[in-house]
Amino acid sequence: MKELPKTDLATLESQIPEGKYMLFFTAGWCPDCRFIKPAMPEIEQKYQDYTFLKVDRDENIDLAGEMDVMGIPSFVAYDNGQEIGRV
């Protein structure tokens, strides 16, 4: 899984104009994030048509705010530059 460097929403959307992406918002201190971490390879395998991007919520606090990501872990799916769903 690639790690997304610090960015903002406009820059992010310019970097993912085509294809399917899954943003995984997480943080090192988050117990639920640590709980799901061992399952991530299986999740990535199941959704191979997506490029997974790990987003450190603390490093990207402004991006999380712009995207209304209020809780972690969070998954936000994009298809051709458009958000198509979130969990």
Image (cartoon, rainbow, N blue to C red):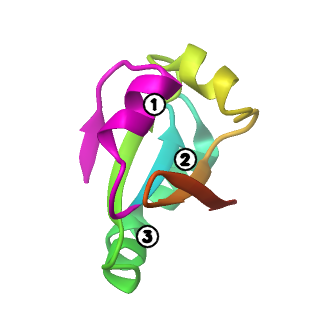
Q: CA distance from mark 2 to mark 1?
A: 8 Å
Q: Amino acid at mark 2?
A: Cys
The span shown in magenta is 1-20
Point out the residue furthest to the left here: 2
Q: Amino acid at mark 1?
A: Gly
Describe the element under mark 2 as helix, strand or loop. Answer: helix
Q: Which residue is mark 1?
A: 28
Q: Residues within 10 Å of mark 3 (few under 14, many from 20)?
A: few
Q: Is residue 25 left or right of residue 43?
A: right
- Where is residue 5 shown, x and y percent of the image? 29, 25
**Label ID, residue 33:** 2
The reply to whether the C-beta atoms of the residues labelled 2 and 1 are less than 8 Å apart is: yes
Q: Magenta includes 14? A: yes
- Where is residue 68 shown, x and y percent of the image? 74, 32
Say which of 78 and 80 sits in front: 80
Q: Which residue is mark 3?
A: 39
Say which of 71 and 30 sits in front: 71
Q: CA distance from mark 3 to mark 2?
A: 10 Å
